[in-house]
Image (tube, rainbow, N blue to C red):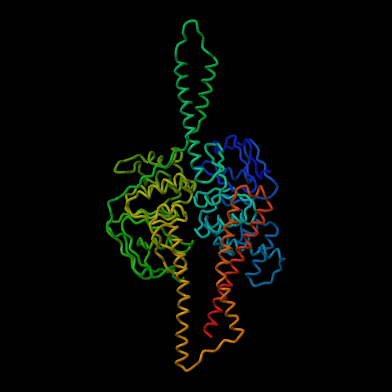
Amino acid sequence: MALISMQGVTLNLGGKTVLRNADFFLEPGERVCLMGRNGAGKSSLLSLLSGQRQPDSGIVVRGVGAFGHMPQDVPASWQGTVFAVTAMVLGPQGAGLAAAYDATTAGLPCELSQEGWEYYGEVLGVINRLGLTPEADFASLSGGTKRRVALARALLGAEDLLLDEPTNHLDIETVTWLEDFLLRRARSLVFVSHDRAFIQRLATRFVEVDRGGVHSYACTYDQYEERREARLDAEERAFALHDKKLAAEEVWIRQGIKARRTRNMGRVRALQRLRGERAARQQRQGNVVLQAQEAARSGSLVLEAENLGFAYPGEKPLFTGFSTVVQRGDKIGLVGANGAGKTTLLRLLLGELEPSHGSVRLGTRLEVAYFDQMRAGLNASASVMDSVADGNDTVVIGGKARHVAGYLQDFLFTPDRLRLPVGVLSGGERNRLLLARLFTRPSNVLVLDEPTNDLDMETLELLEELLGDYNGTVLLVSHDRRFLDNLVTSVFALEGDGAVHEYVGAYTDWLRQRRTVEAGNASAKSDDKNEAKPALGDEAKRQGARPRKLSFNEQRELTKLGQELEALPGLLHALEEEQAQLEAQLAVPDFFTKDEQGFHDAAARLEAVEAEQTALLERWEFVEARLTILDGA
């Protein structure tokens, strides 16, 4: 039985038909990704499925049980600390958990049942994994942080989830954790996202909202793109045949009636029907036209940093000792957790901030265009037109003057939206407006701080193509893994160790090199320990001391530990293989519907395997430490 079914639904918003006679269903175990252009109606469809909005016609039937819903706009009624707002989703029990947290942080005793403490730990765990501060006042948070609280509430509220852009404002590490969490814990899922790597790993079915219609594709992401293009091509051919027939009938109706003949009224009625169908047809929304204006080439050296470090007053350094040289044409991605200092590093490299120590030398003939993730370059009270042209009627693009209205149409701004204040625009529209403003300025260095947030898939791919063809230098901060992989040639990584590490290649190359470096560091530490042992022995001999002979029990323990250490890699490898098999099994679209108990058993076993891996690694650490002690005895 479907968890949600929607039949013949029509929804009108502000005079626009968002859905027209649309059908939708969600079966247990499905993970459905809603696709479509900005403004197509994806969030409206989610609000219908959650029950927050009612259709103008048609029916929406929801099964028994709650749905965890992360809305696009956070309700203004949420108040209290982050912990309290998050725990509210658990109902009356949530109030008790919030009181327990307040008491615990104040050092006061509190009483909870065993189940209560389990819920308490789960709430705190999700809050911490999403990078939230439990005691922070919710009302004082930024919009992006409030959305993370909304995500935490949704994840804790139910096994069936409706999530609207859950990856926005999350760093790569948190997005990866969220993927694992949803694969392991979500029974069914409907989500909106433009993160292609996130979509590719999670979605088992795609539902596209397009001009009021809802089209379903049960396939992989790559197959979805192919089938969608095939559908649109077939639609274009059908429209062309319809227009050809309509044109022929229009010629016929204008001809005079020949002798002894009357007008064929059936054909006239058919013509009227053709006219009605043509008038009701909605054309596809066009694509954004992106064209960066390139200034004269910069010098070969764009910038050089030497022993660069920075710390805000009264805080520990974000990073120290960073040296690099950026050459003309480099495309560099900056990666790291939220708060690691990526935007700060950008501003240091551009000369907007003074470093705590070290220096930055900028090259010659630099023309920098800067895309600010906070959109500080946009005045919320200014109109869309004034934000691009600074009050002028024309902008110069490619050496030619263009009327600002025509230029903004390239960025999908219709004439009725040109006089609107920036403050009423959606997130996607603001990003498009900032790109429009950015590309009116000639540049040979593009600095983009999270430009992909809120952009629909088509615009994202066009931006990716434009940056790939750009002849200047690109410095890019993004949490979109596919975007980074397709674009950058080197990575500056802030890995939380107080340093900035430079890697050749894109995001995937960085991950591989990082694992190699970590493995090398672990091996070097082991070698250092082994090299230190003879030196200690020599020192003991120089002092005339004899090494202590191991007792019989210690010799037997040494042998057993050595055998155990040899077996540990094999045991860990077996667990990793079992983990991969379980994850693949849980990712099968119809696994839950065919075998619900098997699905729950596999999910439980996956949690157990992860716990066994942790215990095994802890045991490995203990064995190595004990062997070091015995070898040095």
Residue 527 placement (x, y as % from top left): 46, 76
Position of residue 388 relative to residue 506, above or below, is above
Give the left or right position of residue 287, taking residue 33 as reference.
left
Nearest the viewer among 121 and 346 is 121
Residue 68 placement (x, y as % from top left): 63, 52
Residue 269 placement (x, y as % from top left): 54, 18
Give the left or right position of residue 449, taking residue 2 as reference.
left
Name, please, the residue furthest toward the top: 260
Q: Please tell me in which quadrant of the rendered image residue 414 appears.
A: top left
Position of residue 525 relative to residue 482, above or below, is below
Nearest the viewer among 433 and 487 is 487
Nearest the viewer among 311 and 580 is 580
Residue 578 placement (x, y as % from top left): 59, 60
Q: Please tell me in which quadrant of the rendered image residue 394 appears.
A: top left
Pick the quarter of the image with the N terminus: top right
Residue for point 53% across, 80% down: 628
Position of residue 398 relative to residue 350, above or below, is above
Taking the image as drawn, is residue 98 in sight? Answer: yes
Taking the image as drawn, is residue 72 in sight? Answer: no
Pick the quarter of the image with the C terminus: bottom right
Residue for point 57% across, 86% down: 550
Give the left or right position of residue 38, taking residue 86 as reference.
left
Q: Please tell me in which quadrant of the rendered image residue 140 appears.
A: bottom right
